[in-house]
Amino acid sequence: MTESVKVTVTLDADTQDFIRDKVEHGSFASTSDYIETVIQQNKDRERARQRLDAELQKGLDDVRAGRVLPIEEAFAEVRQRLGITKSSR
């Protein structure tokens, strides 16, 4: 488990009330729990965006290198992998 570090954060009144409401209605155990959850979700989204960017870059690299298929061949390959016949659309 990682070490916890105390951090002081200044929030406007509306934000503080919003978080307090979330805690009071049982969505989160504490203000810290809420803030940690929001930060973790942000980190997860950032990692997902980085993975997507990397996959998009691979696709662009494939196009630049000529590693492409005509669209009908690509769809035929996907249908074959999934066991879908053209008539079952």
Image (tube, helix red, strand yellow):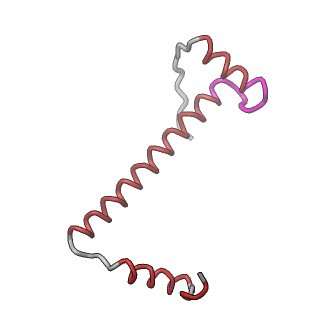
Q: Is residue 42 above or below residue 17?
A: below
Q: Quadrant of the C terminus?
A: bottom right
Residue at the spot 37% in from the left edge and 77% down from the top edge: 71
Task: Report the span colored magenta.
Answer: 23-33
| Residue 31: quadrant of the picture | top right
Q: Position of residue 80 (x, y in %)?
A: 50, 87
Q: Is residue 67 above or below residue 18?
A: below
- Farthest right residue? 25
Q: Is residue 61 left or right of residue 13?
A: left
Q: Position of residue 55 (x, y in %)?
A: 37, 61
| Residue 35: quadrant of the picture | top right
Residue 67 is one of the magenta-drawn residues: no
Q: Is residue 5 left or right of residue 30?
A: left
Residue at the spot 52% in from the left edge and 25% down from the top edge: 5
Residue 24 is one of the magenta-drawn residues: yes
Q: Is residue 77 above or below residue 65?
A: below
Residue at the spot 64% in from the left edge and 29% down from the top edge: 34
- Farthest left residue? 65
Q: Position of residue 24 (x, y in %)?
A: 77, 23
Q: Quadrant of the N terminus?
A: top right
Residue at the spot 51% in from the left edge and 38% down from the top edge: 42
